[in-house]
Amino acid sequence: MITERTLRIVGAVLAAVGAGVTGYLLSVRQTGGTLVCATGGCETVQDSAYAEVLGVPVAGLGLLGFLALLATAVAPGGLARLTHATLALTAFLFGAYLLVVQIAVIEAICQWCLAADVLTTLICGLALVRLLRYDASPAPAPPAPARPYPKPRPAGRRAHRPRPKQARSRRTTR
C-alpha cells in the first residue's frame, strides 16, 4: 500500500527535478546561452512570443511553480494536501496549454518543456491521489461514557460513614 509519506517524497523528488529543468531553461534564457536540444525546436520555442507572460519568462514561472509544489509536497496536513493538488492541477493545465501552443502555433517542440509537462502530469496525479485518499477527516471520537454520579441519598436519612479510628489514650487511675 502506498502511504501518504511515500506520495509526499515522490512528489517532492519530481518537483525538485522540475525545478532543475526550469532553472536550466531560465539560466540559459537569462545568460543568452544555447540550449542543449535533441529536437531542434527548443530555441524556436524559447525565442517565441509565448516564452514570456506579462514580461516574465515562462521558465521563471515554472521554477516558482515547481518550488511551490516542492514545498507543499513535503508539508503535512489537510491544507498542504489541498494546496498541493490545486497548484499541481493549475501547473498541469498551464503546461497543457503551452504544449498546444508549441504544436499548433509555434510548430516546434522543446524537449525541456515537454519534460516539465511530463513532470507536472505525474505530480498532478500524485497530488490528486494524496488529496482524495488521505483527506478524509478521521472519524470523530466517540463521546466519553457518562460519569456515573453518586446515587441520591434517601430523604431524611444520613448516609452511614465510618468514623475514623481515634487513638485510645491510656488512663491510669491512682
Image: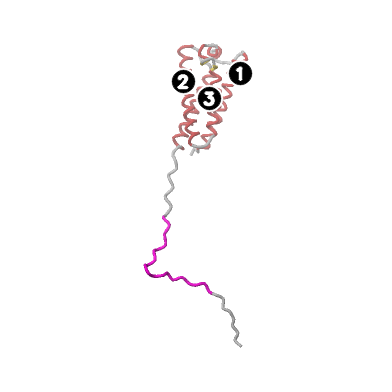
Q: Which residue is located at x 47 percent, y 24 percent?
A: 92
Judging by the rendered image, the residue that carries numbered circle 2 is 96
Q: How many marks?
A: 3
Judging by the rendered image, the residue that carries numbered circle 3 is 65
Q: Amino acid at mark 1?
A: Ser
Helix, strand or loop for disc 2? helix
The image quadrant of residue 27 is: top right
- Please tell me which of labels 1 and 2 falls first in the chain: 1
Marks 3, 2: nearer the viewer = 3
Q: Which mark is residue 142?
A: none
Q: Give the position of the C terminus as an image quadrant.
A: bottom right
User: Could you say where residue 141 lies in the image, as x and y percent from the top left?
Assistant: 44, 47
- Please tell me which of labels 3 and 1 falls first in the chain: 1
Q: Which residue is located at x 50 percent, y 28 percent?
A: 123
Judging by the rendered image, the residue that carries numbered circle 1 is 27
Magenta span has 38?
no
Q: Nearer the viewer, residue 169 or 102?
A: 169
Q: Which residue sits furthest bottom?
A: 174
Q: Main secondary structure of the magenta part?
A: loop
Marks 1, 2: nearer the viewer = 1
Magenta span has 163?
yes
